[in-house]
Amino acid sequence: MRTVIFDLDGTLADTSGDLLAAANFCFRQMGLGDVLSHPEDAGVALRGGRMMLTAGLNRAGQFNPATVDEFYPVLLEAYRDAIDHHTMLYPGAMEAVEVLKTAGFGVGICTNKPEGLAEQLMRSLGVRDAFASLVGADTLPVRKPDPEPLFEAARRAGGDPARTLLVGDSDTDRTTSANAGVPSVLVTFGPSGDDMAALKPEALLDRFEDLPEVADRLIA
């Protein structure tokens, strides 16, 4: 079976608001106030918790790797407690998933968000059952851009890893697909959308309505 595997943050859903709120909770604990802002820092948010802490501390002139290590668990806890206050699925995402499934594709998720948080978020949004698989940053000993999480997401969705593609929004997703030897489709509607063309994916996606046709074309 052919499979379409989705990244989560910045691809299926705009999670930047809740991620930035969790980072700013940490910065307030440090006495720095709200260092990051939305939507200006949405792109930073989608690079992960450690990147947000690093960027904020650099902005405040107080970067220290030990501080990032100390507050990363604090950030994860704050995010877990308020994971869906601002997060929204991108328009057309779930409609495209259903069209793909009707056309015989398997669908799954491969994210560098910790698996438990990804499961929590997808269930909170009410869409977890639409996906046959979910592989997170800590599901396997390796994470994207290693290709194995993508392969595992395809296998768990009942598909052939060689007949899959990854829909994402970052250079990490592009590199993952390249390492796996499968096509990549990068969305242009996320915070980093203007930068996606330079990564030369097999396809750019301006709207989810076009994904089923793109997937059918890219996976023989």
Image (cartoon, rainbow, N blue to C red):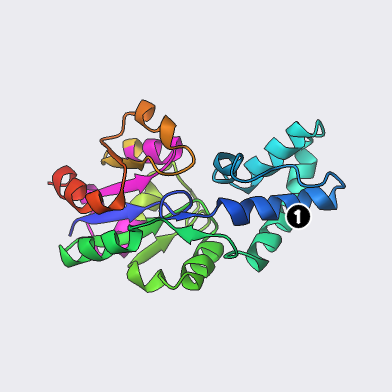
The residue under the point 82% across, 51% down is 28
Q: Quadrant location of the N terminus?
A: bottom left
Q: Please tell me which residue lies in front, 61 or 72.
A: 61
The residue under the point 25% across, 66% down is 98
Disc 1: CA contacts within 10 A as few (<14), some (14-19) or many (>=20): many
| Residue 168 falls within the magenta-colored stretch | yes
Q: Position of residue 100 (x, y in %)?
A: 22, 60
The residue under the point 37% across, 57% down is 91
Question: Tag 1: residue type?
Answer: Phe
Magenta residues span 153-177
Q: Secondary structure at mark 1?
A: helix
Residue 131, placed above or below residue 63: below
Residue 191, placed above or below residue 151: above
The residue under the point 32% across, 29% down is 200
In the rendered structure, the answer to whether residue 17 lies left or right of residue 137 reads right
Residue behind mark 1: 25
Q: Please tell me which residue lies in front, 104 or 188.
A: 188
Q: Please tell me which residue lies in front, 99 or 148.
A: 99
